[in-house]
Amino acid sequence: MDATFLYLRCLLFLFCLLSHMEAGAVDERQLLLKFKSTFENSSTNSILSTWNSSNPVCSFSGVACNGKKYVREVDLTDQNLSGFLVLDDICQLKFLEKLELRNNAFHPRLFPSEIFSLKNLTYLGLANCSLQGPVPKSIGNLSELTLLDLSYNNMVGEIPSEVGKLTKLWMLELYCNHLNGTLPFGLRNLTNLEYFDASKNLLEGNLSEFRFSKNIVSLHLYENNLSGEVPAEFGEFKKLVVLSLFKNMLTGPLPQKLGSWSKFVCADLSENFLTGTIPPDMCKMGTMTKLLFVQNKLSGEIPQNYAKCTTLKRFRVNNNLLYGVVPPGIWGLPNAEIIDIGSNRFEGPITSHIGKARTLALLFMSYNQLSGELPDEISKATSLVSIVLDNNRFSGRIPRSLGDLKHLGILFLQSNMFSASIPKSLGRCFLLSDVNMAHNLLSGEIPSSLGSLPSLNSLNLSNNQLSGQIPEKLASLMLLDLTHNRLTGVVPKTLSIAAYKSSISGNPGLCSMYMSSFPRCSPGSGLSKDVRIVIICFSVGSAILLVLLICALFLKKRKDEERTLKEESWELNSFHVLSFTQDEILDSIRQENLIGRGGSGNVYRVLLADGKELAVKHIRNTDPSGGKSKEFDAEVATLSSIRHINVVKLYCSITSEGSSFLVYEYLPNGNLWDRLHT
Ligand SMILES: *[C@@H]1O[C@H](CO)[C@@H](O)[C@H](O)[C@H]1NC(C)=O
Ligand SMILES: *[C@@H]1O[C@H](CO)[C@@H](O)[C@H](O)[C@H]1NC(C)=O
Ligand SMILES: *[C@@H]1O[C@H](CO)[C@@H](O)[C@H](O)[C@H]1NC(C)=O
Ligand SMILES: *[C@@H]1O[C@H](CO)[C@@H](O)[C@H](O)[C@H]1NC(C)=O
Ligand SMILES: *[C@@H]1O[C@H](CO)[C@@H](O)[C@H](O)[C@H]1NC(C)=O
Ligand SMILES: *[C@@H]1O[C@H](CO)[C@@H](O)[C@H](O)[C@H]1NC(C)=O
Ligand SMILES: *[C@@H]1O[C@H](CO)[C@@H](O)[C@H](O)[C@H]1NC(C)=O
Ligand SMILES: *[C@@H]1O[C@H](CO)[C@@H](O)[C@H](O)[C@H]1NC(C)=O
Ligand SMILES: *[C@@H]1O[C@H](CO)[C@@H](O)[C@H](O)[C@H]1NC(C)=O
Ligand SMILES: *[C@@H]1O[C@H](CO)[C@@H](O)[C@H](O)[C@H]1NC(C)=O
Ligand SMILES: CC(=O)N[C@H]1CO[C@H](CO)[C@@H](O)[C@@H]1O
């Protein structure tokens, strides 16, 4: 039997040899054409159209040959190829070194074992190829591999320790699979490894196997279940520039020399249980852009060095146990986009350095013990979109210069000790959407300019010492809280409905013509008796009319909206970088997406293809005379039913002659922090 086997092997060998000698390149063409024939719809693929029997194999698109005209590379990235990935044929290409099939639409299948005959393969790219099942142990046979990319598949089970045999590996990509177990014993032998990414898997255990990865440049293991400490050896890695380990269960202190040797760029260790202090020298070479340690148990002060780290774009240490005075230079980092130091124990003032923070968009520092006055220079940080500094000990007046911040959308100053009056200049911040100044010592009148802000959603001025009348225009907000102040006079007509009762209570000086829970206004303070009678009669009569009107309008509206939206000419005005198009919004203005219905417009919940949710408020332009229509009550009823939904960010407006849409971020649970992940 052995003899027979040998004989057959010999025959096969001879056959192979002969076919090679005859015309190697022609054979390779047949192999590739057979490979092509395994794809569905290969006839409609433009690259594969060059794969035909009259073209020489080296002129096939996506194919590269070596000096002897043998196929060295096959690269069919992003070709939308479908069918079962069958590699029998292509794996007979003796000189193949690179096989890249990323981002195709293959049918699910196990890791193709044919591949293991390709001993010369140096580059194997099978990302997003619908591979299933475990990573086979035979992967260890491909000992020439320098790049192995199996990311974006459905691979399960543990990473086989045979991977440790691929000692030439320079890049290993395993992210977005379902790999579990610990990082295998053997990874330590991959001393040439520079890029490793096994993020978004189910890995557990510790990082010990990486203690020997002294050439590592970029290490990503975020969104796993890794535990234990970051090994001390990481502090000695001379080439490390990116370390991304967020959302794991890591504990213990960080090596203090971490990132100090190389042109270090990014440390993202958010959402772990790290203790100790922030390593001080990650920006030593002046290249760091992201320092992200959100939600850990770090303590100590912010190292002074970061105040000089002018390359920093994101400085986020929210939710730790850090303390001390924030080094003044931090406020003025010239390239910072986010400074997020909330929920710590920082103290001291925001210094005038903030005037240098020209790119700063988000400034978060809630729940600390910061104090002093806000410097006027804050107005020079002209990119500011959100100022969130609630629950601190700030005092003094709110700077008038805030009115210069043309991009400001969120202003949260609540639970501090701000005094004096609310600056009228805020009426010039046209993008303001959410304002909270509750629980301060503010006095004086509510500036009526706030009522003219076109995108204001919520205004909370409760628990202050505000006096004077409520400005007429403060209506149609998703949230209005003016409770517990010293407001006086007549409750404006627009607020004289039940939905607003809880927004204005706790102001003993208020009176109302219509709301029983307030003292009636004396005749001098409001309208004459005749006018009142007319209004009451009108209300009763119009109630019936209103119902009919709303029904009619509603039916008409449904038709109008569905029929004509995209035919109209629209103008899009964006206030943020948009990840959606105008058409995506207009296409989603459909009955099934309606979450609230009102007189002057409806509110829709829009689910984008990428899973992001938006709230879209449709406002039909009212008649030229400008006054609120009778449908106003209905709208308030609608909007007040979702008024506690925290609609924070206004992305854009889309307007035409007849109506306009305001597109907001939609936050069902209203958690401001959730939306700001790294
Ligand atoms: C093969 O493809 C080339 C274009 O690359 C084309 O010019 C030629 O006509 C094709 N030959 C056949 C037999 O389809
Ligand atoms: C991919 O192919 C499918 C069918 O094979 C087709 O419906 C789809 O439009 C193609 N997509 C692209 C981007 O070519
Ligand atoms: C690897 O490539 C060499 C030439 O570089 C060739 O002689 C050899 O047959 C190839 N090995 C395999 C297993 O294909
Ligand atoms: C995976 O490939 C498909 C094409 O088959 C593509 O549409 C999709 O965007 C790719 N996914 C990723 C994460 O690149
Ligand atoms: C390939 O790997 C498997 C599993 O590790 C091993 O049993 C087999 O001997 C290897 N084959 C070759 C040709 O090296
Ligand atoms: C890993 O997942 C496989 C199934 O995919 C399971 O059988 C195995 O027990 C898991 N191992 C660990 C360590 O969780
Ligand atoms: C690592 O490599 C050494 C020497 O090449 C070898 O003896 C050892 O078995 C390897 N370790 C693992 C876990 O593969
Ligand atoms: C890391 O985990 C391995 C088992 O996976 C264990 O043997 C080793 O002691 C652990 N190292 C540390 C420092 O906890
Ligand atoms: C993560 O690991 C811990 C133990 O370290 C375990 O209790 C927990 O269930 C794991 N979580 C997941 C999602 O696997
Ligand atoms: C207004 O802000 C205060 C302080 O943050 C808060 O307690 C109160 O609930 C807010 N009002 C509404 C209606 O949300
Ligand atoms: C399996 C598959 O994708 N088939 C498609 C091939 O292309 C034609 C049109 O070119 C489609 O109708 C098939 O559905």
Image (spheres, rainbow, N blue to C red):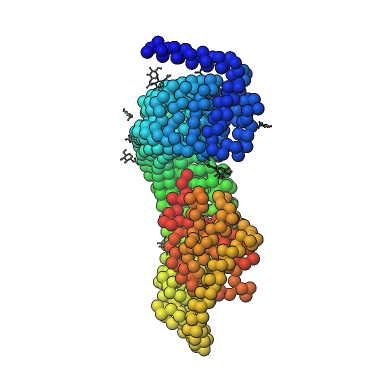
Q: Quadrant of ligand 1?
A: top right
How far across and how far down the image is residue 622, in percent?
59, 71
Residue 620 in view, yes or no: yes
203 w.r.t. 481: above or below:
above
Residue furthest to the top in view is 3
Residue 396 located left or right of residue 380? left
Which image quadrant: the N terminus? top left
In the rendered image, residue 295, in percent from the top left (x then y), is placed at 40, 44
| 477 or 424, nearer to the observer | 477
Number of residue marks:
0
Where is residue 603 shown, x and y percent of the image? 50, 63
Q: Looking at this view, is 35 or 576 the one in front?
A: 35
What residue is drawn where x is 54% and y is 14%? 17
Q: Residue at x 52, y 87 (%)?
A: 534
Residue in the image at 41% along x and 30% along y: 135
Residue 221 seen from this side: no
Q: Is residue 346 above or below residue 287?
A: below
Q: Nearer the viewer, residue 189 or 283?
A: 189
Q: Is residue 441 above or below residue 272?
A: below
Q: Position of residue 517 (x, y in %)?
A: 40, 78
Q: Residue at x 55, y 64 (%)?
A: 618
